[in-house]
Image (cartoon, helix red, strand yellow):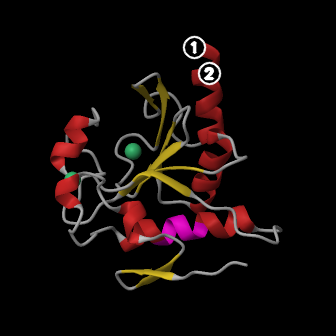
Amino acid sequence: MDRKNSHIGDLETHFWEHEIRCPCLKCRRKKVRVSSFLLFKLEMMITIIDQGLDFHKPVIVLSGNRCEEENKRIGGFPGSEHIPDPDGEAADIKVKGITPIKLGLIAEEVGDLRIGIAKWGIHVDVKPPSPSRFWVYIGKKPIYSAKIENESLLKFYKIVMEGK
Ligand SMILES: [Zn+2]
Ligand SMILES: [Zn+2]
C-alpha cells in the first residue's frame, strides 16, 4: 500500500523527479534540485492524509520547481520560492477529495510551512513566515495573514472569506 519507491537527493519519497521538475523544454534534462526539508514536510502530510486509509491517496504536484523564464511565463511572483536557489522550496499541491482549506490545515498541523490557500489547492513552502504564515488567493491576488490573524489558519481563512 504505502510504498515509497522513488529517491530524490537522499530522500526516499512518494514523489518522482518529473513531478517536481520545471516543465519547460530547457529544464527537461536538468537535475532536479529541491529542498529535502520541503519533501520531508510533504511526506509528513502524506502520513496524515493516509492515516486510517488502506490505500495511498496521491498528493498531486501542480507546480514544483520553475526556472525564471517559466515563472515569468505563467505569471508567478518575481523571486518566487518555486525558483530553485539553489533548491526549489515550494510546491503547489492538491489531493482528490480533500478541500484546499482541509489540506491547508493538514499542512499547518505538520508545521514549519507557509501556506497559501487557493481554489485549485494549496501552495506550501519552507521559507520563514516573515511576516505572513498564511495567505488566501482571491483570484490571483493574495490576502496575507500577518496583519489579520497569523496564528490560526482556520481563523484567518474564516475572516477572509467573511469579508469577501
Ligand atoms: Zn524551466
Ligand atoms: Zn506556489
Q: Which quarter of the picture shows residue 107?
A: bottom right
Q: Could you tell me which secondary element the residue under label 2 belongs to?
A: helix
Magenta stretch: give its range.
40-44
**Vertical arrangement, residue 77 with respect to residue 48, above or below:** above
Please provide percent x and percent y for residue 93.
51, 50
Residue closer to the observer: 86 or 148: 86
Which numbered dot is residue 119?
none
* Element type where label 1 sits in the image: loop
Q: Which amino acid type is shown beneath numbered disc 1?
A: Lys
Mark 2 vs mark 1, CA separation in Å: 5 Å
- The percent position of residue 97, horizontal first and vertical second, equals 73, 46
The reply to whether the magenta stretch includes residue 127 is: no
Q: Quadrant of the N terminus?
A: bottom right
Quadrant position of the C terminus in the picture: top right
Q: Which residue is mark 1?
A: 164
Rendered position, 20 above or below 16: above
Mark 2 Cα shell of 10 Å, populated few (<14), some (14-19), many (≥20): few
- Residue position for label 2: 161
Task: Residue 162: give x, y in percent of width and height.
Answer: 64, 17
The residue closer to the viewer here, 85 or 113, is 85
Amino acid carrying mark 2 in the image: Met
Image-based side of 35 in relation to 112, left or right: left
Picture quarter containing residue 11? bottom left
Label 1 Cα neighbours within 10 Å, binned few <14 / some 14-19 / many ≥20 = few
Kindly identify the residue that appears in the image at 61 percent across and 63 percent down: 45
Q: Is residue 153 left or right of residue 98?
A: left
